[in-house]
């Protein structure tokens, strides 16, 4: 029956002029709504959903949305377990029921088409399809298509939503934009809850299917979706629902913060269980401490992940520090050899990575304890100052006050900058940079000659900061918090903004581009 | 001498009067000033007063001074007899004379200064100082004087010393007359005679003087002709006593050239004004020539090539200049002559112009001058050739017609040259497009000249708005430089020629230059920062930015501790060296240029740039073959491994043999021309050579740093263990060896750090606090100046009050005197009137008595 109808549609469509598709769609929608006679016009509408033309598709989507929402409201859709289309005719049912089943089938195919359209190239189509699906979900919520008598189930269009999630978490296409549009719907607590559940399923299935290999596009989509989930901080905030539950509201999981948290936690753990690409790793770690850990019901479950990350080394270890810190600080995590690992994290790149500020902020916290052994603090100081020899000025402006602060906190480290007992004996630097154990690097026997060298640094502020070790340090600690985020340009602006009165000039008259009295460039390079 | 004596006497009088015991003890005279409270140890000056005494003292003083003045008022002069003891009646006249003589002697004998031994009594002869006489200032005068003084005329002696006898003897001839004449008359006659004689002598003397002077002058005029002395004269010279060396020197010093007043130094403004005027004149010339007006100035007379231009004309020039007409000598035809004149005139003018240029160029940059000169020479050559053509034409045609109207072709040719020639005045560009339009299409040298002329025409001292215009010009110029650098291929030679202009503009306006440079650097740094934030990495600065940085090092001192331009420039270099990934050979080149600039910047101050060392290490790391090594760590932007980590790896070891050291083109930061693998290898080797050279320079620069060894350790490890030096050319190997020698393997020894020695804090001193005693009431003002001011104000007030009081007393005194005078006069008059009345009454009485008697 359906194919023949379709053909009919096609021929009639060919007769009509293509320009007035809006009119056609509108009239057909009207017809379908007016009487059951014209139910077959739905096929025409669905045909439009597959159209090549973007405008037609968008228009058709809105028409379908309107149509089916109204039908749902009228209760024209078949409720309950839907038999197969072929079975409808065979079974012995009355016309009304058949009609309902027919409409229900068309509804299902419409949803399918819409989900397909979410993979459309045009964002406009995607967006309207997404909105339509969500409208359906809302309508279904009001007029459930399942029979209500099952007590376990709550009234929520789960299939619809999981279908949507499947489409959203595409393996081929970056859906970031659409997902951010979807965020609006994620504000609703029940939607969020069910999305989290279906995401978890989805990850399981997709990753298992792909044999746990890295899938950057897919994982990116998942990550975008996950980061777009904003968890409520209190149970009382959970009031915004897509669907209304009349019965057994109290037991509804979607209305409980605890279940939300658990779903959230499970979702993340599932996501993190699989191997992540490097940049994804970093991204996760960046947001871990303030948007994941607080919303987990049991943050300690993250220990495995964080420990693994901490052992990776480099920037990832730096980022893992933050999560570890929260676990240690708030959840009583005992991490053996933490300081030793921290010590070994220090390499020249700490001054160059993007997360420098965060790292120094945390290191500052870790080393703020006055119960640390002197050798450890001295080792940190010495290592930092050795690394400072390769640091850019912005890094130096952090690390120099940092070192001074450490010496202030641990007065027994003062020998590093003031050793009057052996003032006359010269010696080689006893510090062993390559030694991994801070207890055996002989830092305490050394002096901070590196800082002394940095007193000759080209930037006046750095030079000044390094000169602080020439005198006994004043009692008050320097505040490094505002230096942490200092960028090169901001540092430059200090010079650009201070309008000094006089501008000294070079007195050697310039005669050519490569002819200054101290020419180096001209020795190696020529104009031609 | 009289004054102090007088004063003393007054004082004495006063003292005497005040010292009267009687008065002091007289309770009616004494007034006791009331004191509020007693202060221990203070000696009161004014606790007891004697008002009567002080009043009389004041009165006496007034009488002695004010009253006398009052009496002398309106009287023209007075005679004060200051002779010693003139009015002293007690002194005997003999005593007076003796005393006076003694005083006179004393006065002359009295030495002014007891230590001045030279100041002795002046010796005289005939009332004239002997010292003066010894000087013999004027030979002629002294001669005549001696004549005059020495020969005493017989008459005078006779009349002076002969006494009566002389006169009597004279009488022999004219006894009769003499007898008639009285002695008075005789004397008058004598005086007259002597006067006449004197006058005669005077005239005679003057005459001789004049004659000698005239002779002198004549001698001088012919002296030069007698420069060659006859041998005889020479002998005479020899005979003369040899001049004392000292004398000669003294005279030489005397005749030594004194500082001559030179021409006034011109101020910068004047120079600028003259320069502009010159350019305006040239421009007007050029314009006229462009319009096709050939200047014709027949008034000029001929000037020969040998003319020194000193205004000297040997004679009236009536010779005809040589010219041709129709292939024949042309003599005597005015028009042909004129034509020639004109030509030569032109040539001369050109010559003068050149001279001008030379003169002015001296004040400017020397190379500028050269260029300009060249230019003008070319130009003059052109004109010369034109002139030659003119001459040829003349030969062909009749000169008269040709001279007056040059052929059309000529005219056009001149116009063309004028058009090709640069204008002499330029308006300062208002926007960048103006400048671009002004400069584009000209050669580099022309562009430089255009800029120079623009600068001169708009010198800030010439008009008010010029400063802003030129400041803007600097900005546009830099923009233009950036534009040139981004061209493909970059026009670096043009930039090179523009550098002196940029420099001189920056010298004129340091603030503007600073502002422009700052904004350029800030913009570049800002965009780099943004792209780092957005994309996580940034492109290495383009050639334009590299050129800007280089210009910064040329314009501003790089060794300053903090400088508004160079410090941001340093930061920018640092940012570029740490943030910009190296993915191609072009990037390597740009990075190397940055490194070179950085090394240049710190070559004086020897400041430490960690980024520079990191970058050089990274570059060398790119040349090392195996990247598994972990004994040194490269610093971002370089990575131990990666797709571009073998960028500088020389592919073919054979290419090392064909490599020769030559400088890399700056434009290779833009695009590398090398196409074949061999050329690229050569390029890599050149880059490595530069790298190693920079490392070597750094090792010498940072030798003094305590952490020297740690700074260079990674480079050392890389060079010693990983770099395939054996594949490199010998020049590179040598550098490699030198660097390894410069970096010690074993760390150097250092003394442990200690704090700087503090200055000991001085102990607190227990000095008494000195409180200033003020001569006025409260302590006012804090600083010394304020206090002094207050003191003076107070003093002035006090003095003013005192003076006012004194003046009042004076007027009262005077009024009192005047009144008493008037009263005295009135009394006198009354008395006299009374006398008169009484005498009249007497008369009357007597008359009446006589009448009575007569009646009787």
Image (cartoon, grey):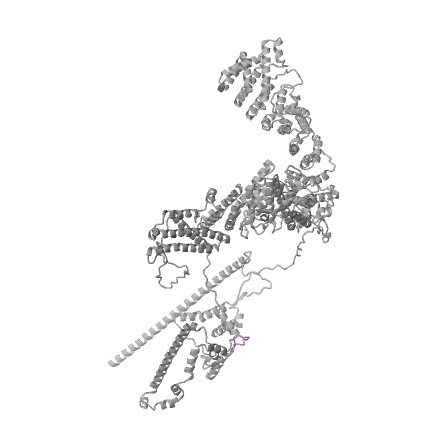
In this view, the residue in front, B87 or B533, is: B533
From the viewer's perspective, is residue A159 above or below residue B19?
A: above
Magenta stretch bounds: B110-114
Can the viewer see residue B564?
no
Point out residue B521 in the picture as x, y percentages from the top left corner.
Answer: 55, 43
Q: Taking B4 as reference, is B666 above or below it?
A: above
In the image, residue B613 above or below residue A192: below
Does residue B77 appear to the left or right of B762 in the view shown? left
Nearest the viewer among B249 and B398 is: B398
Q: Position of residue A458 (x, y in %)?
A: 61, 48
Q: Is residue A152 visible?
A: yes
Q: Nearer the viewer, residue B314 or A455?
A: B314
Report whether B757 appears left or right of A31. Answer: right
Is B111 contained in the magenta span?
A: yes
Seen as rendered, the residue at the extreme front is B327
Seen as rendered, the residue at the extreme left is: B855
Q: Main secondary structure of the magenta part?
A: loop
Q: How many marks?
A: 0
Q: Quadrant of residue A141?
A: top right
Quadrant of the frame with the C terminus of chain B: bottom left
Q: Position of residue A350 (x, y in %)?
A: 66, 40
Residue A327 forms part of the magenta stretch = no
Extreme-right residue of the structure: A440
Residue sitting nearer the eye, B105 or B308: B308
Q: Residue at x 57, y 52 (%)?
A: A517
Q: Position of residue B640 (x, y in %)?
A: 67, 39
Q: In the image, is B631 to the left or to the right of A52?
A: right
Report whether A491 appears left or right of B237: right
């Amino acid at each position: 029956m359906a194919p023949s109808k379709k053909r009919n549609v096609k021929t009639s469509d060919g007769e009509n002029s293509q320009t007035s598709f809006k009119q056609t769609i509108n009239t057909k929608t009207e017809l379908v709504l007016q009487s059951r006679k014209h139910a077959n016009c739905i096929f025409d509408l669905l045909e439009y959903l597959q159209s090549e033309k973007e405008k037609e598709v968008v228009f058709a989507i809105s028409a379908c949305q309107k149509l089916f929402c109204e039908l749902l409201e009228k209760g024209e859709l078949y409720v309950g377990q839907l038999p197969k289309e072929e079975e409808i005719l065979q079974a012995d049912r009355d016309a009304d029921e058949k009609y309902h089943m027919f409409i229900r089938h068309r509804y299902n195919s419409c949803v399918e088409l819409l989900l397909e359209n979410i993979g459309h190239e045009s964002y406009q189509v995607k967006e309207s399809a997404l909105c339509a699906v969500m409208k359906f979900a809302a309508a279904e919520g009001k007029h459930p298509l399942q029979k209500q008598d099952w007590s376990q189930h709550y009234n929520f269009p789960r299939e619809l939503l999981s279908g949507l999630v499947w489409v959203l978490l595409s393996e081929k296409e970056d859906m970031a934009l659409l997902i951010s549009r979807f965020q609006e719907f994620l504000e609703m607590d029940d939607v969020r809850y069910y999305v989290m559940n279906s995401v978890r399923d989805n990850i399981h299935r997709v990753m298992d299917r792909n044999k746990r290999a890295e899938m950057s596009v897919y994982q990116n989509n998942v990550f975008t979706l996950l980061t777009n989930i904003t968890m409520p901080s209190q149970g009382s905030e959970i009031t915004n629902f897509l669907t209304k539950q009349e019965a057994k509201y109290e037991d509804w999981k979607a209305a409980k913060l605890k279940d939300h948290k658990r779903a959230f936690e499970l979702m993340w753990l599932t996501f993190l269980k699989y191997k992540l690409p490097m940049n994804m790793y970093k991204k996760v770690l960046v947001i871990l401490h303030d948007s994941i850990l607080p919303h987990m019901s049991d943050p300690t479950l993250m220990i495995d992940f964080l420990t693994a990350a901490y052992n990776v080394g480099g920037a990832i270890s730096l980022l893992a520090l933050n999560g570890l810190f929260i676990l240690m600080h708030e959840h009583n995590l005992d991490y053996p050899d933490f300081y030793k690992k921290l010590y070994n994290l220090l390499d020249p790149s700490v001054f160059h990575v993007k997360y420098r500020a965060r790292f120094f902020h945390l290191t500052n916290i870790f080393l703020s304890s006055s119960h640390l052994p002197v050798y450890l603090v001295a080792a940190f100081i010495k290592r930092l100052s050795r690394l400072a020899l390769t640091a850019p000025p912005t890094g130096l402006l952090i690390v120099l006050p940092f070192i001074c602060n450490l010496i202030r906190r641990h007065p027994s480290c003062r020998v590093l900058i003031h050793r009057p007992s052996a003032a006359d004996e010269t010696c080689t630097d006893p510090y062993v940079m390559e030694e991994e154990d801070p207890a055996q690097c002989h830092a305490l026997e050394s002096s901070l000659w590196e800082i002394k060298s940095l007193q000759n640094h080209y930037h006046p502020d750095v030079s000044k900061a390094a000169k602080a070790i020439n005198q006994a340090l004043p009692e008050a600690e320097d505040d490094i918090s505002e230096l942490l985020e200092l960028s090169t340009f901001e540092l430059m602006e200090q010079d650009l903004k201070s309008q000094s009165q006089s501008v000294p000039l070079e007195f050697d008259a310039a005669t050519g581009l490569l002819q200054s009295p101290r020419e180096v460039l001209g020795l190696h390079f020529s104009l031609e | 001498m009289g004054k102090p004596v007088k004063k003393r006497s007054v004082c004495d009088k006063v003292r005497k009067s005040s010292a009267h015991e009687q008065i002091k003890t007289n309770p009616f005279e004494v007034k006791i000033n009331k004191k509020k409270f007693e202060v221990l140890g203070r000696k009161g000056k004014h606790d007891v007063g004697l008002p009567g005494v002080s009043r009389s003292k004041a009165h006496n003083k007034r009488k002695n001074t004010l009253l006398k003045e009052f009496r002398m008022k309106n009287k023209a002069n007075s005679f004060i007899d200051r002779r010693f003891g003139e009015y002293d009646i007690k002194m005997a006249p003999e005593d007076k004379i003796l005393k006076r003589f003694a005083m006179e002697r004393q006065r002359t004998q009295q030495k002014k200064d007891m230590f001045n031994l030279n100041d002795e009594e002046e010796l005289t002869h005939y009332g004239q100082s002997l010292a003066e006489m010894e000087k013999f200032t004027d030979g002629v005068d002294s001669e005549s004087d001696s004549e005059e003084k020495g020969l005493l005329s017989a008459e005078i002696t006779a009349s002076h010393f002969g006494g009566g006898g002389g006169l009597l003897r004279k009488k022999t001839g004219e006894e009769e007359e003499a007898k008639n004449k009285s002695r008075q008359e005789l004397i008058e006659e004598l005086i007259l005679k002597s006067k006449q004689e004197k006058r005669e002598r005077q005239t005679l003397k003057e005459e001789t003087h004049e004659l000698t002077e005239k002779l002198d002058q004549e001698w001088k005029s012919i002296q030069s002709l007698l420069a060659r002395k006859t041998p005889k004269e020479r002998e005479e010279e020899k005979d003369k006593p040899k001049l004392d060396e000292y004398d000669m020197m003294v005279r030489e010093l005397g005749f030594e050239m004194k500082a001559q007043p030179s021409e006034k130094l011109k101020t910068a403004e004047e120079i600028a004004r003259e320069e502009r005027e010159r350019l305006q004149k040239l421009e007007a010339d050029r314009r006229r020539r462009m319009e096709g007006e050939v200047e014709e100035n027949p008034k000029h007379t001929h000037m020969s090539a040998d003319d020194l231009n000193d205004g000297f004309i040997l004679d009236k020039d009536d010779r005809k200049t040589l010219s041709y007409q129709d292939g024949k000598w042309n003599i005597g035809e005015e028009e042909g002559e004129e034509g020639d004149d004109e030509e030569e005139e032109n040539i001369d003018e050109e010559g003068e112009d050149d001279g001008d240029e030379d003169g002015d160029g001296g004040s400017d940059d020397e190379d500028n001058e050269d260029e300009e000169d060249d230019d003008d020479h070319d130009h003059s050559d052109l004109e010369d050739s034109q002139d030659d053509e003119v001459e040829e034409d003349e030969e062909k045609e009749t000169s008269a017609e040709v001279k007056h109207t040059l052929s059309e072709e000529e005219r056009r040719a001149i116009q063309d040259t004028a058009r090709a020639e640069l204008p002499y005045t330029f308006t300062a560009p208002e926007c960048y497009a103006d400048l671009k339009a002004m400069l584009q299409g000209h050669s580099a040298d022309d562009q430089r000249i255009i800029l120079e002329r623009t600068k001169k025409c708009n010198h800030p001292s010439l008009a008010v708005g010029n400063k802003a215009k030129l400041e803007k010009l600097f900005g546009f110029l830099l923009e233009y430089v950036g534009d040139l650098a981004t061209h493909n291929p970059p026009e670096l030679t043009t930039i090179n020629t523009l550098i002196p202009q940029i420099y001189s503009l920056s010298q004129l306006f340091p603030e503007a230059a600073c502002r422009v440079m700052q904004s350029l650097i800030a913009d570049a740094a800002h965009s780099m920062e943004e792209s780092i934030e957005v994309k996580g990495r940034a492109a290495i600065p383009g050639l334009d930015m590299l050129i800007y940085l280089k210009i910064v090092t040329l314009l501003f001192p790089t060794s300053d501790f903090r400088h508004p331009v160079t410090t941001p420039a340093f930061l920018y270099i640092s940012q570029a060296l740490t943030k910009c990934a190296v993915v191609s050979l072009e990037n390597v080149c740009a990075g190397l240029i940055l490194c070179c600039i950085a090394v240049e910047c710190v070559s004086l101050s020897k400041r430490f740039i960690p980024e520079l060392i990191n970058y050089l290490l990274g570059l060398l790391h790119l040349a090392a073959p195996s990247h598994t090594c972990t004994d040194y760590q490269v610093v971002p932007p370089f990575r131990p491994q990666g797709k571009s980590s073998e960028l500088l790896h020389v592919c073919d070891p054979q290419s090392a043999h064909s490599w020769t050291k030559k400088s890399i083109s700056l434009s290779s930061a833009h695009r590398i021309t090398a196409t074949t693998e061999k050329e690229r290898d050569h390029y890599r080797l050149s880059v490595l050579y530069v790298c190693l050279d920079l490392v070597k320079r750094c090792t010498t620069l940072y030798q003094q740093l305590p952490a020297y060894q740690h700074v260079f350790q990674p480079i050392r490890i890389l060079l010693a263990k990983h770099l395939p030096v054996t594949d490199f050319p010998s020049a590179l190997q040598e550098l490699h060896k030198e660097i390894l020698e410069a970096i010690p393997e074993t760390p150097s020894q250092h003394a442990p750090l200690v704090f700087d020695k503090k200055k000991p804090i001085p102990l607190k001193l227990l000095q008494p606090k000195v409180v200033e005693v003020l001569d006025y009431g409260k302590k006012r003002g804090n600083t010394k100046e304020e206090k002094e001011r207050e003191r003076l104000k107070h003093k002035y007030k006090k003095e003013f009050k005192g003076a006012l009081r004194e003046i009042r007393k004076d007027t009262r005194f005077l009024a009192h005197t005047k009144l008493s005078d008037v009263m005295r006069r009135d009394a006198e008059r009354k008395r006299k009137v009374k006398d008169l009345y009484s005498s009249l009454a007497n008369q009357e009485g007597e008359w009446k008595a006589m009448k009575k008697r007569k009646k009787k």
